[in-house]
Image (cartoon, coloured by chain):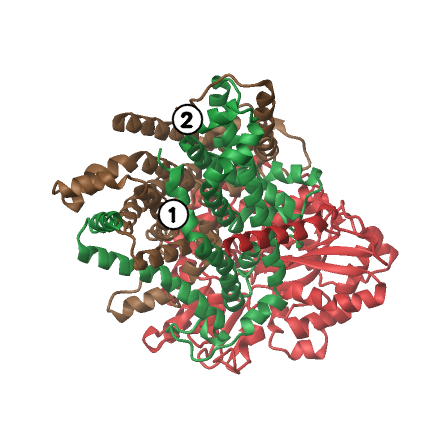
Chain colours: A green, B red, C brown
Amino acid sequence: MTKRLVKQQSRNYLCNFLGFPTRVIVLIFLFIIILFPFYWLITNAFKVEQEYFASPPVILPSRITTQNFVDAVVKYDLFKGLKNSLLIATGTSIVTVLAGSMAAYTLINGALPKKLKNVFAGWFLVQKMYPAVLVAVPVFYIIRSLHLMDNVLSLILMNTSFNLPLVILLMIGFYQELPYEIEEQSMLDGCSLLQRYIYISTPIVKLGLIATGMLTFINSWNEFLYAVILTVYRAKPLTVSIAGFITDKGLIWGPMAAMGCVVVFPVLIIMWLMQKDFISGMSAGALKG
Amino acid sequence: MRKLVLIFLVITLIMGVSPTLFAGETSKPYAGQKITALYFSATYAEAAKAYAAEFKEKTGIELLVVDYPYLTLYEKMGIALSTSDTTYDVVTPACQWDGEFEPYLIDLRPYIERDNWDAEDVIPGLWEQSGKWAGKIMGIPFSNTPQILAYRTDLLKEIPDTWDELFIILDKVHNPKKGVYGMAIPGVKEQFSGLWMCVHWSLGGTWADENWNITIDSPETREALRIVKRWFYYSDPAAPSWGLPESDAAFLSGKAAVALSWPTLGIAPNGDNPEKSKVVGKWALVPLPYDKTGLSNLSSWDIGIPKAAKHKDAAWEWIKFYTSKEKQFRNFVEYSILPSRKSVWGKAEVKQSKLYPHKEASDRGALIWWRIPAGTMAETVIRDAVSNFVTGQWNMEKAISFMEDGLRKILSDYPPPKGVENIEWDFVKSRLKK
Amino acid sequence: MLISRHIVQSRRDVLYSWLFLIPVFVILSITAFIPLGFGFGLSFFKYKLNLQRAPIFNGIGNYIEIFQDELFIDAVKHNIFFAVLAVSIEMSVGIVIATMLSDDSKITRLLISLLMIPMIIAPVAAGTLWRMMLDRTYGIVNYLLTLVGLPAVSWIGDYRIAIYTIIFVDCWQFIPFVAILVLSSIKAIPITLIDAARVDGASPLKVFTRIVLPITAPVIIIIAMIRFMDAFKVFDTIFVMTQGGPGTATEMLPTYIYRQGIKFLRIGYSSAAAVLFIISMSLIAWGFIHLRTKQLERIG
């Protein structure tokens, strides 16, 4: 009881390091600047068409309509976009976390010569080193020859590749935190690498897996460039649909804002539910060093 | 609770992915064939989608329309065509891309001859700039839109014949304090370059002569740059970042006396709709100031069949359907798409509509820039130079030398194929003689 | 060093180790190594995809042409300016916010959830949203400014300001990212250290500078490295807000490469730019990692 109070006191101590009033001002400002665009997005989704380009801009809409959402569903395939985005993001998260944690685990606890481990440890970073647009055309060819055009699998593949560096990097941190004695003990007990990975390490680094999974989910949910290049119409996710509203006939604000809301909300809900796990996951070990 | 969310997501994933694992490529032969067409979003795609049901009834062919905004259409089309992708059976390149995509589209002449397609009905001069290329017919033009001026009939008492006259008129009507600007223009670079070209050509300027020697360093170029830069004085301060929607909105809400922004897209369809416009009954269209040549910029789209298409015959059926007299007329009435057929222009409803001034602009002459494989690169050079000049980042000399060097380099790296002349030169010089 | 464990293990484990690495290897080969290999090879050729002719060998011609293209030099300058400024702001503000949110109150937890919002909005969506709000005439931001008597600003149309606007939107999106990661790191600091300092009479500011900063420095350096390298890949925001404009004021390396590779279909040329890009990024990454190692040694 006292310990918790003490801990709280210290935490509260630190957070006022620039003074209490400063903190209040900064946090209020933060609150406004984050929420206001969000408010704008939502109100625009419900605005009547005349009020988009009204001058002066309308802050509080006088009339509300749900027509934009209806349009988004009917004319712009909202549900299909949603389904595709969901498939891509979930698929990517699962594959990336699986493959990445397996690789990270092996790099820390695997049965390979040390030199080899060090060499491999750097290679996956290459994916971080260049803008994705660079390899767009070769990738286009490759995906085509694999007959994966306009297929969510191709996007899962690409997004996994983009997120592997971060996942591996973070999971390495987690696996480094694992006390090695546990590994040794289970090895003496006769556990193979596979068994150790599944039964010993996974429960311990569970938070890390969740945290990296969520980061991957967000990144792949928001990916745009390859979604445009590799999809035609069947696998179009929401990000492509949103960009599609920038037509020359008009920036069709209404349905675009409606779709924008839909793009944001699922991720928001998931983040809200998993928020505690996420932060504890990150602090538990990924970033200690 | 969290676990439930995870499980839910995993199940959705499995359900969603399993069908796609067995899907394979785009076309599955149902009863009758299935073809895919690539269109520019906005009116052209809408019209196509609306006709798909009727087309299926008539021919049994199922049509799928895929559309993209202008921003990404070129890349999608370019990559698909250059890599011999089989996804699309029908594509609709913009006429300025003809030179770049021509090698990947089939020659339509056999089909045209076989079915006796009424080729004479196409407006003369249009096909040469939109669909025909070095003797080959790679596409049939289906929309013919010259750049044109929209103006307020209650504010303008005279129609300017030269760009200087326009300035005189603007001086009279420009009144920002009362909320009326002289002009509404889209200042974003991808739109603005086209406007500069209109001025440049109407003054008699050219980029190169008939043998592709660069002629852009000329008095006409300088004058054109000065003119377009001055336009910003008469427009809303936000114009440099405006696209077509914003400038249309400015005109429709009564805040501008003159608009230069492809009226068929926004102003014409909405101008007389009291819910969307405050200038109902107070606007009209008129060709751009004639100045020395009367030329303006052409926006035209052709429709053609990629060499890699799998259902060429079915694709040709769609092309005939979409470009037929009835459909072009319907395009005009319902979607403000200007026809490419003389016969449709001759119809009473078309003649009486407010869009009819486009015919006069078209007769005067509308030009598209270089239709060569490196056409996009050339336009980008012009676009960057003009934009940097009007925003004050470059002075005139720098802008002009950039254009000259850029165009020269493009022509030396990617020389136009033999037999392809610079028709820009013919257009301009023949009119200057008059 | 990252990897430091080594022990004699069974043959079966060796097999498993290789098997575990295969998924990553396969995925990265298909999506990265092979395309990059292609790119590297193609960078020595002149190859415009939509011409019907085969690639022409060009030696290092593409590389020379790149350095002579003033638009490339401009893109590099803009990108460096953007990266340095954006990352500095994101890191400093992010760290400050993270520290301010390091307590355990309910309000803090609410704010942290809200903080995640900019992170999860797709850059495309965020860019479009801000473009709408920052329009000089129809935008809400200018309207609010004029209400309090400040002049309206042409955030996107003025070439001097446009790049700061892009930086602002980038910061808006990623300060939360930095803040949350740094926050996790701060929460991992053993409470005893802070306690001891507090009992010793150190002011909160001193606790921050003497304890929090040095301990979280390795993490901060890695986050800075990630942000810095990402800043050279910024594409979505610019594509949607300015298209590299006004003029060429916000042209950056990714948009330059996009323009050359996908718009102009000059595969050879854009691959050469790619190679240069990767080399520079590797050097920068090496620099950051070196810095971090030194800092780790210092903490001991």
Q: What's under tag 1, amino acid-wise?
A: Phe
The part of the image, by quadrant, that contains residue B36 is bottom right
Query: Residue B228, which numbered label?
Result: none
Q: Is residue A187 above or below residue C88?
A: above
Within-10-Å neighbours for mark 1: few <14, some 14–19, many 20+? many
Q: Nearer the viewer, residue A34 or C55?
A: A34
Q: Position of residue B121 (x, y in %)?
A: 77, 65
Q: Is residue A109 above or below residue A198?
A: above
Image quarter in which the C terminus of chain B is found: bottom right
Q: Which residue is mark 2?
A: C2
Q: Nearer the viewer, residue C86 or B201?
A: C86
Q: Nearer the viewer, residue A252 or A242?
A: A242
Within-10-Å neighbours for mark 2: few <14, some 14–19, many 20+? some
The part of the image, by quadrant, that contains residue B343 is bottom right
Q: Please name the residue shown 45% across and 51% down the image.
A: C237
Query: Residue C177, which numbered label?
Result: 1
Q: Position of residue B14 (x, y in %)?
A: 65, 49
Q: Position of residue A162 (x, y in %)?
A: 52, 39
Secondary structure beneath dot 1 equals helix
Secondary structure beneath dot 2 equals loop
